[in-house]
Amino acid sequence: MTKSIFDLIIFILAYILFIFLPNKRAHIAIIASLVLVFTQVITLKQAFYAINWNVMGIFVGTLIVADIFMQSRVPAYLAEIIVDRAKNTASAILYICILTGFISAFVENVATVLIVAPIALALAKKLKINPMNMMIAIAVSSNLQGAATLIGDPPSMLLGGFAKMNFGDFFFYKGRPSIFFAVEIGALFSFLVLYFVFRSHKEKVQLLAVEKVKSWVPTIILVLLIILLAGSSFLDAGFSYMAGILCVVAGIVSLIWEKFINKSSIVAGIKNLDWETTFFLMGVFILVGSIALTGWIEALSNLLSGLIGKNIFLGYGLLVFMAVLLSAVIDNVPFLAAMLPVALSLSDKLQINPSLFLFGLLIGASLGGNITPIGASANIVACGLLKKEGIEVRFKDFMKIGVPFTIAAVSAASLFVWFVWKG
């Protein structure tokens, strides 16, 4: 058996196991990577350089900052104020979804759901209504806006690392409106779907004030990090190291602040981080690096270009549709990591602006997870919180909101990308 065939078998097997054993995905990615290294399909040096350490720095650093920010209770405090000032329940739910999206543009999606969920559950209990639709709306809103900025979600970080896009490039890239505006156009249309779902809730409610801000310092750290990331492009135009260093430094500052102000253990704080996703990302980088080295990326690119011919819109639509469909059942991180180099190679063969295919992939992969309760980590967490309340979320329950929400958001966002970047 040749190295390339063996590599493809390991790659496909790992991705199948990602689907059927999602709770073991980090173990699967690391074991598959070690098998490839030990069998010399990829050398240890090649595996090391296949990992985008700048992206890893962004991910781990923002995880720490987000955790401290969540513990400060600022987001939950703001959510309470929004609910109390809303004219009725429908408005309160929609405002909570908007706040969820805003937070998710700068904080990892799962953390965002954990921040906002208690407010939604308290509102549902006070009104004696089923919180299921509300929690689903919060989950899909967090997934949507997570794609809007470099630090919002791992798929955005993957795109940033692959295309050498800095924080500012997500707003304006090479003189054109970038992915942020595509996501906001999608959010506008998907918001209409949520309005339709909740429009009948006309009750007026006031929550008892429960949340108190522990400290505004984590908020200041997060805002400063965003400002520094926005300015880092002037020092690191190639997006090779600065963003990762800034995020790690912000994470260290957050841990030190937590240690001396709240007497928390730095070691415990580090242990509580999402190391599973961290090692999963590292393993996926190595798996994708190996299939690039053995020529499979180029082979898939040739196959797709043969199917598409010269019809650019067909190629773009096919990539977006495939990303939406597969991300509904496959974790969007390994899918996007595998497809980004394919999209780049394909755009080179068709001699078009690569941003068209790259941005389309990000939209499809990030929003496709909103179709099913297992399509994104935020969905799984939201359904888990509902299960603790004695509410079982079936696939059809989730898809009643997830499918129209996704169709509206993807259609609007992908068309925006097409018209801006097709030339």
Image (cartoon, rainbow, N blue to C red):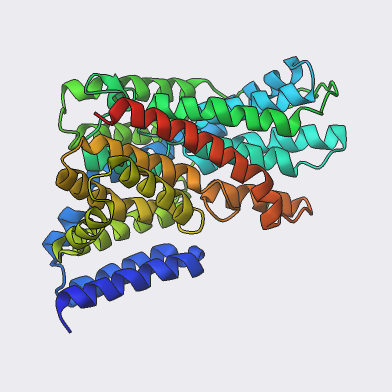
Residue at 19 percent across and 58 percent down: it is 302
Along the horizontal axis of the image, is 409 left or right of 400?
Answer: left
Give left or right: position of 59 versus 192.
Answer: left
Between 378 and 319, the one nearer to me in the picture:
319
Query: Which residue is farthest front?
Result: 310
Name the residue: 28% across, 31% down. 422
Q: Is residue 136 above or below residue 329?
A: above
Q: How many marks?
A: 0
Q: What quarter of the picture does the C terminus occupy?
A: top left
Residue 43 at x, y = what percent? 13, 67
User: Looking at the image, is 411 positioned above or below residue 384?
Assistant: above
Of 303 and 98, the residue lying toward us? 303
Residue 180 percent across, percent down from the top left: 39, 26
Q: Is residue 60 visible?
A: no
- The quarter of the picture where the N terminus appears is bottom left
Towards the viewer: 337 or 282 = 337
Residue at 84% x, 20% y is: 204
Residue 169 in the image: state x and y as whole percent: 28, 26
Looking at the image, which residue sits at the far bottom? 1
Q: Nearer the viewer, residue 197 or 383?
A: 197
Q: Is residue 160 placed above or below 374 in the rendered structure?
A: above
The part of the image, by quadrant, that contains residue 314 is top left
Residue 145: tell me if it is visible.
yes
Q: Residue at x 44, y 65 (%)?
A: 18
